[in-house]
Amino acid sequence: MSAINEIRPTPYQAQVLSIPEDHFIFLGGGRGGGKSMALQFLILRHCQQYGHIAKVLVTRRRLKSLIQFAEELRFLLRGVYGREVSFNQNDAVFRLPNGATIQLTHVESTSALSDVAQGMSFTLIAVDEAGEGPTMEVIDQLGLALRAKGVPLRMVLAGNPGGTNHSALAERYVTERAPWLPFEFAGNTWVYAPSTVDDNPHLPLAYRRNFEVLRHTDPAIYRAMRLGDWSALVGDYFQGIWDADRMVIDHHDVPPDCFSTLKLSIDWGSSAPCAVVLAGQLAMDVRLPDDRVLPKGAWVIYDEHAEVDPRNIARGTGRTPGQIAPSLHKLCARSRIRARGVIDSAAEARTAGRAEASIADLFREAGVRVTPAKKGARVPRFEHLKQLMVNGEFYVTSRCRYWLATVPGLPRDPRIPEDVDTKANDHFLDATSYAIAGESRGRVRVGSFGGAGPKEPNVTRVMYV
């Protein structure tokens, strides 16, 4: 029992342990704050309190980092129970003398999830390094395995800013959430518990000095990793180009009358989000109250509508164009314009050989007058948008919260560095590029698979004027 006296919670970890047990927790902050150790203290206390009822699941995306976590947890458990703790390397399960079990597994995908949680029940589920994965869909499905009687059920997520889940984690648990104060999300009470390296007195001074290099070489990464600032991190696709302080404006400062045109731009999705932006070009120079000047012809993403699952911004709602249209009419009415604009040209497609209405047709039937966008290749559209940003000819209003939560943090495609990673939540970027590209010529039609029709006879046509 003497070893446990040498492992004491830091003040930050003690505050985490003071959170009521029926509250879910998001341990979000910079590197080195002691989040993983706080997670281990929560696991240890849970097992001590509930004995054989306690069934804990710990996940990380990568196997190597999970092995490191297992070694740290073994050291902590042996400090309390000594050699009585058993660990089966085949199924990666700790078994404690009081009957509690702790299962460790790496979960990279939905298929891997079925191997872990199918038919299993847990009382505490801990996802470490949640920013790196698994996807939020997999994390949400893990929550379905929380099943037991007579014990508070809890999920704990821990992660740094950045990674594939950065936008979703920030939107759910950080943005407009007061640290340490409970809030409701998806029927559960959560607490956002941030930390920084200053909360961990056990780290050497040399570790803290390493951050100072980033202060000069990459200020955004410095603010994210050193200060735990979730709003500082910009995806590497717009790295060095996007500047929120310069490009984000208040819509009250730019009335709709300042635009030469305002139009909708729709990137259609059903299972994926349907992203709609209201975009336009300024008809005049506009001086803001802070003396910034928006030049004539500059593009402004003025408003938006996001068809997203409120629990996961990477997932759509499944609603039809007819169900979405009233929201778009309401969106346009706020700016005193009619619901018209462009839509992804793929939404004009009809089932081959049949006279079914396309997605665009359904929007038009609901009063939203759309024409196909001048789609073209992705990379030139995105590069044009980047050039507008560099030239000071692109702005976004602060009420476009989903645009701001997704687009600035988009990563590059590792195979095609000039493009955005297609696995990322790029729907609002696509909608924005359609608006700027404008309308294509004519309607997009899809014919049958029966080949070309019969040729018309060669007759002379005469036009009278």
Image (cartoon, rainbow, N blue to C red):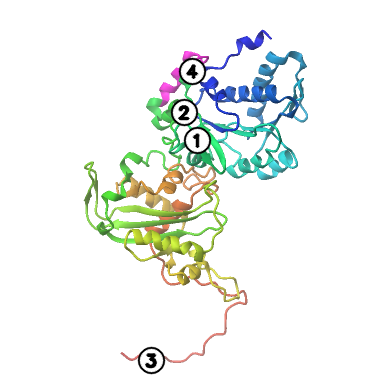
Q: Are marks 1 and 3 in contact (CB under 8 Å)?
A: no
Q: Which mark is residue 462?
A: 3
Identify residue type, mark 4: Tyr
Identify residue type, mark 2: Met
The residue at 66%/37% (across/down) is 107
Q: Locate residue 426, reporting x and y percent.
A: 49, 50
Identify residue type, mark 3: Val
Q: Nearer the viewer, mark 4 or mark 3?
A: 4
Question: Sequence-wise, which precedes: disc 2 or disc 1?
Answer: 1
Q: Which mark is residue 225?
A: 2
User: Residue lying furthest top in this view?
Assistant: 2
SS at mark 1 in the image: loop
Q: Locate residue 448, reporting x and y percent.
A: 59, 75
**Mark 1–mark 3 distance (CA, rounded to whole Å):** 66 Å
State whether residue 68 appears in this view.
Answer: no
The residue tagged 4 is 207
SS at mark 3 in the image: loop
Nearer the observer, 101 or 433: 101
Query: Few, some or many C-alpha atoms within 10 Å of disc 3 (few <14, some 14-19, many ≥20)?
Result: few
Span shown in magenta: 199-214
